[in-house]
């Protein structure tokens, strides 16, 4: 991985899972991302930390083109996300084509966004049935497998209101996995949970990492980052300030901004 500002060539299919090349994102006059360059290898876990408003979640949303970038390029598994390039110019893909790209990327948000009127099983089976046109029987069988994987086999027929926050988030993870993604994005998945429920969600994420899932995780859980991540990135004011081995960055940060941020958490 690298977080350098150098120009990088477009990756081939056997290159990194995610390649961000000088990505800029503006909201009006506000510059939220200012030339972010990152590389994430297949099967690796990248954790992104930083203060509120540093651009972490926006960068995550740019990866799967939930947000349009204003400059630079983002590739997932060799594919330019959200655009096609012709004669050196970028043209935005149609919403339908962009959605087709996005279905290979699972995303788990702070808030679980489950359908309240559907059971855990139905929440998980819905997207494969609607998007991939998988039959109900097969989709529900896969949903049961995933519920077992996240430790909720007995909650198949429970509605979200009958589940704890941690259980809802685990259903949300299972729902993302139901599309068989090659990349999982987590946007502060434990920040809305009561402290005693955080561990059960992190345990599922640790298992995913050990199974070889490529993951980009925006988090404040430094213990998780230290234990699971291959690389830790500290972002502030829309730029990558520091990156490296999580244990090294956490125990011996090199930049004053990183030191100041970590001193409030560790």
Image: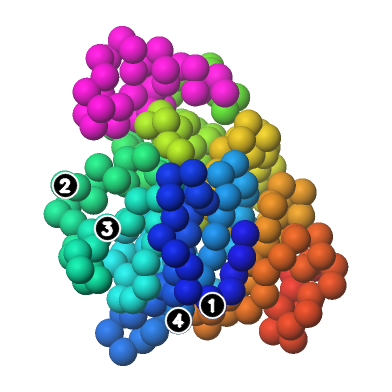
State the separation of the CA atoms marked 3 and 4. Answer: 19 Å
Q: Earlier in the sequence, mark 2 or mark 4?
A: 4
Q: Find the residue positioned furthest to the right.
A: 251
In what element is the residue under mark 3? loop
Q: Quadrant of the N terminus?
A: bottom right
Residue 232 in picture, x, y percent from top left? 67, 62
Residue 15 in picture, x, y percent from top left? 50, 49
Q: Quadrant of the C terminus?
A: bottom right
Residue 133 in picture, x, y percent from top left? 22, 23
Q: Earlier in the sequence, mark 1 or mark 3?
A: 1
Residue at x-position 63% and y-position 79%: 241
State the separation of the CA atoms marked 1 and 4. Answer: 11 Å
Q: Which mark is residue 82?
A: 3
Q: Find the residue positioned furthest to the bottom.
A: 29
Residue 157 in picture, x, y percent from top left? 41, 19
Q: Which mark is residue 5?
A: 1
Residue interval drawn in magenta: 120-149
The answer to whether one can see residue 99 in this image is yes
- Nearest the eye: 162 or 96: 96
- Nearest the eye: 145 or 251: 251
State the separation of the CA atoms marked 2 and 4. Answer: 28 Å
Tell me which corner region of the image, top left, top right, bottom left or bottom right, holds residue 248.
bottom right
Q: Earlier in the sequence, mark 2 or mark 3?
A: 3
Quick check: 6 above or below 165? below
In what element is the residue under mark 2? helix
- Nearest the eye: 172 or 154: 172
Tell me which corner region of the image, top left, top right, bottom left or bottom right, holds residue 100.
top left
Q: Residues within 10 Å of mark 1 (few under 14, many from 20)?
A: few
């Amino acid at each position: 991985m690298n977080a350098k500002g150098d120009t990088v060539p477009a990756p081939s299919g056997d290159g990194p899972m995610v390649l961000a090349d000088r990505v800029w994102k503006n909201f009006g006059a506000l510059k939220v991302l200012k030339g972010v360059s990152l590389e994430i290898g297949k099967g690796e876990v990248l954790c992104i930390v930083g203060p509120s408003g540093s651009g972490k979640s926006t960068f995550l949303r740019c990866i799967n083109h939930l947000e349009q970038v204003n400059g630079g390029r983002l590739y997932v598994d060799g594919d330019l996300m959200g655009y096609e390039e012709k004669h050196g110019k970028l043209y935005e893909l149609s919403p339908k084509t962009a959605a087709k790209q996005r279905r290979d990327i699972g995303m788990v948000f702070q808030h679980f966004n489950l359908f309240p009127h559907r059971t855990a099983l139905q929440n998980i089976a819905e997207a494969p049935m609607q998007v991939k046109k998988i039959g109900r029987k097969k989709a529900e069988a896969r949903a049961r497998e995933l519920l077992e994987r996240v430790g909720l086999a007995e909650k198949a027929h429970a509605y979200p209101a009958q589940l704890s926050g941690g259980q809802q988030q685990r259903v949300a993870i299972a729902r993302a996995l139901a599309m068989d993604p090659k990349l999982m994005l987590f946007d502060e998945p434990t920040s809305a949970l009561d402290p005693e429920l955080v561990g059960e969600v992190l345990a599922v994420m640790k298992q995913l990492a050990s199974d070889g899932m490529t993951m980009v995780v925006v988090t404040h859980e430094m213990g998780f980052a230290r234990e699971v991540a291959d690389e830790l990135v500290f972002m502030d004011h829309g730029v990558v300030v520091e990156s490296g081995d999580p244990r090294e960055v956490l125990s011996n940060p090199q930049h004053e901004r990183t030191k100041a941020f970590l001193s409030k958490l560790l």
